[in-house]
Amino acid sequence: MNADFNTARRETKQRSASEGRFATILQVLPALGGEGGVERGTVEVAQAIVEAGGRAIVASSGGPQVRELARVGAQHVMLPVASKNPLVVYKNIERLAELIQRERVDIVHARSRAPAWSAYYAARRTGRHFVTTFHGTYSRENWVKRRYNAVMTRGERVIAISAFIGGHIRQMYGVPADRIRIIPRGVDLERFAPRAVKAERVATLATAWRLVDGLPVVMLPARLTRWKGQTVFIDAIRKLARRDIQCLLVGSDQGRSEYRREIETLIDRHDLGPIVRIVDHCPDMPAAYMLTDIAISASTDPEAFGRVIAEAQAMGRPVIASDHGGARETIVEGETGWLVAPNDADALAAAIGRALNLSADARQRLSVRAARHARENFSKQVMCAKTLDVYNEVLQLKART
């Protein structure tokens, strides 16, 4: 296990022993559905808290990941914290305050805006520490939105998931640098590791997706929403003008049926049906990366972090991403992948062509560098260790007051 993680564990145990009990951390988020970065990170940090000898509690409106919480020894409390109804938000202050007092919570960690408002006032009411994680840039088209978002800056420590987000909250919300802690999202390197993916899983997926042996696979994994750049990718493949490749759009439309039809129309209009296909949600992304020769992130708006890029590199896959946001921190240009101008189909096509033309030796060297880069900078263990460091730092603030 990572040395920093063990250090954080020892520090937590030492502090807890001096107080006569272990620390209790309450994480609050809207729901525990799906495999999103917020939900996954919540479970992973809960596990780290438990392994460090603390108590991990999560309040949410529920979802499939509740089972994972139970598996790692954390407690889940069902509350309607996904609601944005002002009356429900107000009522949740009382619910959370009761929970905090009953369970002797030391730190309240809010991970999303709507529940953060309730969590902030509940923490104030009970005199507990308050920490937030700022997961994105959030829309801020008017003062109401900015006010709504600003609750995420009220933590005694504000965790930003990239330096890009850290800069954003300093510039847009005036949060001083000494309250911000940069903690990139972590990749589960036991799950996203080539050695962990059995050949049968890869074969099953290849059959389901009707892939042809011997043809390179270019994959854009992202939910179907316009800013993820699926239309830019399709245009790039059209400009590339190669018929000896297979391109996959891996992600659910999540109800955006009109945008999905637009993508399908573009594919048909450019006669790309034999080359480009939508394969919807994939529950086995490690196997999907194993099938892939190039992973693409074509987001037209800046990614807060870019989990797909980190996962693909962990699997030793070349990556191409838009040159803005968190991608600039996750890719080493020319060493682990390439950055291209956002919303530029010509630049994306050229980069895909360059990646497809790599020699076997060059591809192998890039694969080794990419996996090492992900392992050293974006592991789940590092993320959890740094989060525990923040908790320890906040708890020490209490000792000085």
Image (cartoon, rainbow, N blue to C red):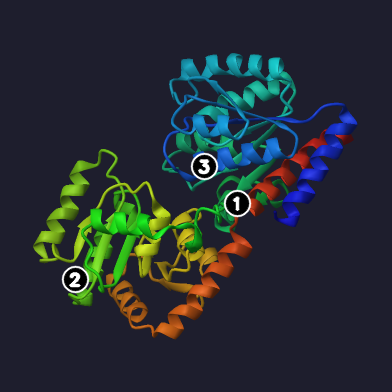
Residue under label 2: 238
163 on left or right of 229: right
Label 2: element kind: helix
Say if residue 369 shows up in the picture.
Answer: yes
Whether residue 108 is situated above or below residue 93 in the rendered picture: below
Residue 95, image quadrant: top right
10 Å neighbourhood of mark 1: few (<14), some, or many (≥20)? many
Identify the residue at horizontal 51%, vertical 66% (top origin). 328
Label 3: element kind: helix
CA–CA distance in space, label 3 to label 1: 10 Å
**Which tag is nearer the camera, tag 3 or tag 2?**
3
Q: Position of residue 333 (x, y in %)?
A: 50, 75
Q: Position of residue 287 (x, y in %)?
A: 39, 57
312 on left or right of 8: left
For marks 1 and 2 on the same chain, the one whose residue lies earlier in the sequence? 2
Query: Residue 380, which numbered label?
Result: 1
Q: Quadrant of the N terminus?
A: bottom right
Whether residue 235 is situated above or below residue 190 in the rendered picture: below
Residue under label 3: 40
Nearest the viewer among 121 and 257 is 257
**Which tag is nearer the camera, tag 1 or tag 2?**
1
CA–CA distance in space, label 1 to label 2: 37 Å
Nearest the viewer among 153 and 219 is 219
The amino acid type of the residue labelled 2 equals Arg
Nearest the viewer among 399 and 21 is 21
The amino acid type of the residue labelled 3 equals Arg
Identify the residue at horizontal 58%, vertical 45% (top origin). 173
For marks 3 and 2 on the same chain, the one whose residue lies earlier in the sequence? 3
The amino acid type of the residue labelled 1 equals Lys
Q: Position of residue 73 (x, y in %)?
A: 63, 31
Identify the residue at horizontal 73%, vertical 26% (top origin). 128
Q: Quadrant of the C terminus?
A: top right
